[in-house]
């Protein structure tokens, strides 16, 4: 969604801002803008559409003097227009601001300011905030750090969420930034400072970062900074090192980030498992859970909460927990959990799964579970993210940055972590050493098997291209293959705009079969040999209605190529890990269909990478 970048230092400010915005393009946006101080005034350039349009509009006479802020906007308040794009300037022209988040009480503040003579030019909540800052600045005495104080006072009146970066014409070498439920970090360089809502914007320049916490403001002047809370307490900055390389956020030789990330899955899985097995190789261990074996034994119920693809990972986790650990497990959409007042039994452990660690609905679900007094753990890919920091403990996926809007390597790593959790809980209960050992062996072999599928991607491309003209598709699977069917359908619709549905294979007869025809191919996940005959019956049912069938099967399956139109074989593996292997061909299938249709794969329409609004 919206992104923020800021810079204070001696380099070409506009260039650094544009570079940062370009690196955050994957997050989804509809307009972009930058602001800096030139002479004794702000220079602001905004454009609709891509950052490229903005950089094309920067003429050589623009020279920001050592400071600047930039933004990509994903509209919430007010339509997509240059007027509504950020940065916004206050009525008196003293301040300019970029803002991520939503000011919920902006209307009442706007009325108050209008009564005091302020005029507004945009429809945004952000313009209200910058004027509130100016209002306080004009009321404050000329002492101490008036700029910082005015921002702080304004924020005290604000309800909602924000990550902001503010410049003041009277203090042309300073920047004030603040956050509440919207990520913001400071990058510390040599005699220069960076600000960003996403580390990928600045990793090319520095790896030394400080993540701001909710309710904190930072004052940046030259290469110095200080952090205070809304209540004026001084905060000692906790400096961290980013463990990314610039290559991690670059496409390299790949045509799209999505393909790069699909191909990175063997490594992402290895990273998710590294150092997380017991010495006797019969179980998993996760120090980050901060729970002793005794406490883990006392867990009677597990709730998984998430959105989108991460919710599909939760559904696989539910299946694995029930089957291997025999623990009653439920899954909730984070957005539903928050308002559902769902009954939870005591000794319930709540897991929130989120790649970005910033999804607002997932964070809100986490807060709700914590409010009710439940131990709430995070499975996330983003170190230092809001969900990671606010949880009682958790597990990092270590998948590396995921830039493609369609989640791929993050999903398989989440399922891998879920399988390891099922192993851990299973071994604390009924699972014996031999079964645990075999599970760990299968996990060790998993990355090589994923690599095998990725290497055969040309075959999947040829199959996919045959279906690229379709407008409807069904994805069908039983048991743990049902969430895989949902994920396959989601991938396809997200990036190719083909209407696709995922269903439990047998449930298809109770309605969706009405859609089945020669125009609606069906993709069957038929990897489980114990229920293969049942799935084959379902295949017969759709074939009888002229549907073309693509089947994903395990090597050596009784379901052979003559039975369906197209067959995709995956290596044999432990049952628990089949969801991971079966997902990979579906990612490639969706990718090559979208590519054949000429879609903008890494930036699908209307979608944002991390959804920070409700
Ligand atoms: O960052 P999160 O895992 O919390 O994101 C959740 C969903 O927004 C995300 O998985 C979304 O569904 C993706 N576009 C799926 O490809």
Image: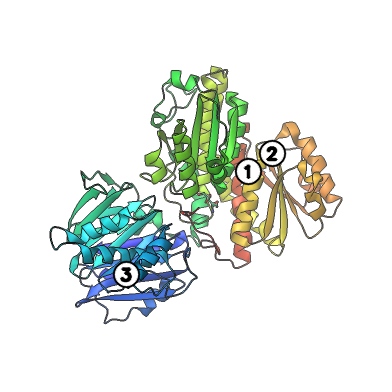
Q: Is residue 571 visible?
A: yes
Mark 3 = which residue? 116
| 3D distance between C-alphas at marks 3 and 2 | 68 Å
Which quarter of the rendering shows the N terminus?
bottom left
Q: Is residue 516 visible?
A: no
Q: Are marks 2 and 1 in contact (CB under 8 Å)?
A: yes
- Residue sitting at 54 percent across and 36 percent down? 304
Q: Are marks 3 and 2 in contact (CB under 8 Å)?
A: no
Q: Secondary structure at mark 1?
A: helix
Q: How is the image coloured?
A: rainbow
Near-viewer residue (125 or 532): 125
Label 3: how many residues lie within 10 Å, few (<14), some (14-19) or many (20+)? Answer: few
Label 1: how many residues lie within 10 Å, few (<14), some (14-19) or many (20+)? Answer: many
Residue 509 spot, x, y in % from top left: 81, 45
Residue 474 spot, x, y in % from top left: 72, 52
Q: Secondary structure at mark 3?
A: loop
Residue 168 spot, x, y in % from top left: 23, 67
Near-viewer residue (114 or 39): 114
Q: Does residue 533 lie above or below 142 as drawn?
A: above
Q: Residue furthest front?
A: 115
Upstream in sequence: badge 3 or badge 1: 3
Mark 1 = which residue? 582
Mark 3 vs mark 2, foreground winner is 3
Mark 2 = which residue? 527
Residue 298 spot, x, y in % from top left: 49, 20
| 3D distance between C-alphas at marks 3 and 1 | 62 Å
Upstream in sequence: badge 2 or badge 1: 2
Q: Are marks 3 and 1 in contact (CB under 8 Å)?
A: no
Q: Does residue 535 lie above or below 298 as drawn?
A: below
Horizontally, is 513 left or right of 274 in the view?
right
Q: Residue furthest left?
A: 143
Upstream in sequence: badge 3 or badge 2: 3
């Amino acid at each position: 969604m919206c992104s923020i970048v800021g810079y204070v230092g001696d380099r070409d400010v506009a260039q650094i801002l544009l570079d940062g915005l370009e690196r955050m393009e994957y997050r989804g946006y509809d307009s972009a803008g930058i602001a800096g101080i030139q002479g004794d005034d702000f220079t602001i350039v905004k454009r609709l559409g891509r950052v490229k349009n903005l950089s094309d509009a920067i003429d050589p006479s623009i020279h920001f003097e050592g400071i600047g802020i930039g933004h990509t906007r994903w509209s919430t308040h007010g339509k997509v227009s240059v007027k509504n794009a950020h940065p916004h300037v206050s009525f008196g022209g003293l301040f300019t601001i970029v803002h991520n988040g939503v000011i919920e009480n902006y209307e009442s503040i706007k009325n108050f300011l209008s009564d005091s003579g302020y005029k507004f030019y945009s429809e945004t909540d952000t313009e209200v905030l910058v004027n509130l800052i100016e209002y306080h600045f004009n009321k404050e005495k000329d002492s101490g750090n008036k700029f910082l104080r005015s921002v702080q006072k304004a924020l005290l009146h604000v309800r909602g969420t924000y990550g902001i970066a503010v410049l003041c014409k009277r203090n042309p070498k300073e920047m004030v930034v603040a956050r509440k439920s919207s990520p913001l970090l400071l990058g510390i360089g040599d005699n220069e400072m960076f600000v960003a809502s996403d580390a990928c914007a600045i990793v090319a320049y520095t790896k030394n970062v400080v993540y701001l916490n909710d309710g904190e403001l930072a004052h940046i002047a030259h290469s110095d900074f200080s952090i205070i809370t809304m209540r004026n307490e001084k905060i000692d900055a906790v400096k961290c090192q980013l463990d990314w390389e610039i290559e991690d956020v670059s496409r390299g030789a790949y045509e799209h980030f999505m393909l790069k990330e699909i191909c990175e899955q063997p490594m992402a899985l290895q990273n998710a498992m590294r150092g997380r097995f017991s010495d006797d190789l019969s179980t998993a261990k996760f120090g980050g859970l901060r729970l002793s074996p005794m406490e883990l034994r006392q867990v009677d119920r597990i709730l998984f909460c998430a959105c989108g693809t991460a919710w599909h990972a939760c559904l696989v986790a539910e299946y694995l927990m029930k089957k291997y650990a025999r623990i009653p497990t439920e899954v909730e959409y984070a957005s539903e959990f928050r308002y559902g007042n769902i009954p939870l039994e005591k000794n319930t452990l709540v897991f929130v799964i989120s790649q970005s660690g910033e999804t607002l609905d997932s964070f809100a679900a986490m807060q709700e579970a914590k409010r009710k007094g439940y131990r709430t753990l995070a499975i996330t890919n983003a170190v230092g993210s809001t969900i990671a920091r606010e949880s009682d403990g958790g597990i990092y996926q270590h998948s590396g940055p995921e830039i493609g809007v369609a989640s791929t390597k993050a999903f398989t790593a989440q399922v891998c972590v879920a399988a390891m959790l099922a192993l851990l809980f299973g071994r604390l209960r009924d699972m014996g050493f031999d079964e645990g050992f075999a599970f760990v062996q299968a996990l060790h072999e998993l990355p090589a098997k994923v690599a095998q599928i990725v290497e055969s991607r040309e075959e999947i491309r040829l199959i996919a291209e045959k279906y690229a003209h379709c407008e409807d598709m069904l994805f069908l699977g039983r048991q743990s293959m049902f969430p895989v069917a949902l994920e396959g359908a989601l991938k396809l619709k997200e990036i190719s705009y083909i209407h696709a549905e995922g269903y439990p294979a047998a449930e298809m007869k109770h309605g969706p079969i009405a859609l089945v025809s020669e125009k609606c191919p069906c993709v069957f996940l038929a990897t489980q040999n114990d229920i293969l005959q049942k799935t084959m019956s379902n295949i017969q049912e759709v074939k009888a209605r002229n549907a073309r069938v693509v089947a994903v099967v395990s090597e050596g399956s009784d379901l052979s190529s003559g039975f369906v139109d197209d067959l995709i074989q995956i290596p044999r593996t432990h049952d628990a890990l089949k969801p991971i292997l079966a997902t990979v061909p579906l990612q490639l299938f969706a990718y090559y269909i979208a590519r054949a249709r000429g879609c903008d794969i890494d930036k699908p329409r209307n979608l944002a990478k991390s959804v920070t609004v409700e």
